[in-house]
Amino acid sequence: MEIGRLKTESGGDLHISGVDVPSQLMRHGLVDEFRIVVAPIVAGAGPRLMEGLALPEGQRLNLFESKTFRSGCAYLRYKKR
């Protein structure tokens, strides 16, 4: 997978957004952390974050950092154990 090759090169982090691509990368063990911003908006439809995701066995994420803003938004940073 091309992303795996890019991860081995020096030059910093890879940042990817969206719903489908991060889920696919997680299946292949290529995600080291997630940085998620939650906005307090109720939406009845649309894609769900990581819906149907089957993590590789033993792969778990821990909440590493969180921050709330006056707007009500929350920043969540999860890292691999």
Image (spheres, rainbow, N blue to C red):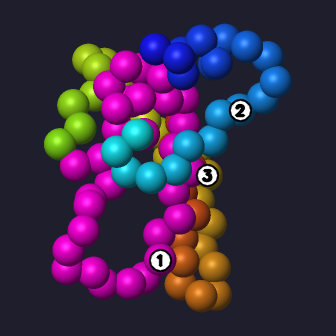
Q: Which residue occupies 41% across, 29% down?
A: 25
Cα distance in 3D space between marks 2 and 3: 18 Å
Depth-wise, is mark 2 or mark 1 nearer the camera? 2
**Residue found at the far bottom of this picture:** 71
Residue flagged by tag 3: what amino acid is it?
A: Glu
Tell me if residue 60 can be seen: no
Q: Which of the marked residues, 2 or 3, is nearer the chain's N terminus?
A: 2
The image quarter in which residue 7 lies: top right
What residue would you read off at disc 3?
A: 65
Say whether residue 8 is visible: yes
Total marks in image: 3
Question: Are the two marked residues, 2 and 1, in contact with CB atoms closer than 8 angstroms?
Answer: no
Q: Which residues are magenta?
A: 22-51
Residue 12 falls left or right of residue 64: right
The residue located at (27%, 59%) in the rendering is: 48
Q: Which mark is residue 39?
A: 1
Q: Position of residue 65 (x, y in %)?
A: 61, 52
What residue is drawn where x is 47% and y is 77%? 39
Residue 13 — which label? 2
For disc 3, the neighbor class at 10 Å (few under 14, some 14 to 19, many from 20) is: few
Residue 47 percent location from the top left of the image: 26, 61
Q: Is residue 77 magenta?
A: no
The residue tagged with tag 1: helix, strand or loop?
loop
Q: Amino acid at mark 2?
A: Asp
Front in this rendered view, residue 19 or 69: 19
- Please state the horizontal and vertical placement of residue 11, each as a whole percent of the image: 82, 24
Q: Residues within 10 Å of mark 1 (few under 14, many from 20)?
A: few
Which numbered disc flags the more N-terminal residue, 3 or 1?
1
Which picture quadrant has residue 12?
Answer: top right
Residue lying furthest front in this view?
A: 2
Quadrant of the image occupied by residue 32: top right
Q: Is residue 41 magenta?
A: yes
